[in-house]
Amino acid sequence: GIQVEQSPPDLILQEGANSTLRCNFSDSVNNLQWFHQNPWGQLINLFYIPSGTKQNGRLSATTVATERYSLLYISSSQTTDSGVYFCAVCPGGSYIPTFGRGTSLIVHP
Amino acid sequence: GAGVSQSPSNKVTEKGKDVELRCDPISGHTALYWYRQRLGQGLEFLIYFQGNSAPDKSGLPSDRFSAERTGESVSTLTIQRTQQEDSAVYLCASTQRAFTGVGGYTFGSGTRLTVV
């Protein structure tokens, strides 16, 4: 099946810092999403982004489908950004999202 | 409803007992997924329902696991003869147009299952 690799696995930031999270995938995809899992376990859909660039406030994401990677940018990080960020992809012909292992982010005040 | 609702939120059961977990998807969402997340791990796919089509059960780890969904409504995940290794958070997600691969997925808050 498709392989989804996220990096870095862990990230610690001071409030106000910027960061870039990466998701590499091993095959072409028709669906790519970024999720944030907060410390209480709730998964929130951040972006649906199979290609191109999107922005939502301090967060933005870019997917280069031809090179099989996606990037999530967090600017001016806040303590509420803490949690685990997951990338999930559906390979072509599949309707089942495969998740990466996530990037665990801790933002200190 | 406004979101995906799961119940119970927490369940503690004795090894060997059966448990039933419930998921109520967003109204109008034709696709429903169950995932399992062990402590500190990623999400592991279990089963996928799309409308009235036969479900994709390829992720179920053993025949102790089963799930049902009637039409586009509530789904139940049943685990028979629970084992300690079944302890995890069971997450349900729904989406409107899975067959096109378009659009985002909405997750419920999960059921935390502890087998003692």
Image (cartoon, grey):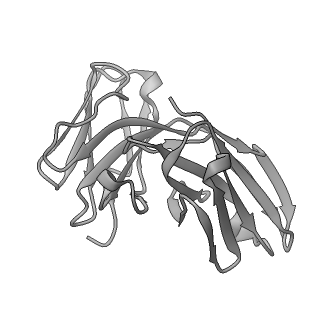
In the figure, is residue B103 to the left or right of A6?
left
Q: Where residue B88 sits in the image (x, y, percent)?
A: 47, 36
Q: Where residue B54 sits in the image (x, y, percent)?
A: 17, 36
Q: Quadrant of residue A96?
A: top left
In the figure, is residue A74 to the left or right of A84?
right
Residue B12 visible in the shown view: yes
Residue at the (41%, 41%) spot, across then down: B35
Residue at the (68%, 72%) spot, across then down: A59
Compared with B28, A67 (above or below) is above
Q: Nearer the viewer, residue B109 or A1?
A: A1
Q: Quadrant of residue B87?
A: top left
Quadrant occupied by the C terminus of chain B: top left
Q: Where residue B91 sits in the image (x, y, percent)?
A: 41, 47
Residue at the (67%, 70%) spot, across then down: A60
Q: Nearer the viewer, residue A106 or B59?
A: B59
Compared with A18, B19 (above or below) is above
Give the total number of marks visible in the rendering.
Answer: 0
Residue at the (57%, 60%) spot, across then down: A51
Q: Where residue A23 sits in the image (x, y, percent)?
A: 67, 48
Quadrant occupied by the N terminus of chain B: bottom left
Which residue extends farthest bottom? Answer: A57
Residue B7 visible in the shown view: no
Q: Nearer the viewer, residue B22 or B48?
A: B48
Which residue extends farthest front? Answer: A66
Compared with B80, B3 (above or below) is below
Compared with A45, B92 (above or below) is above
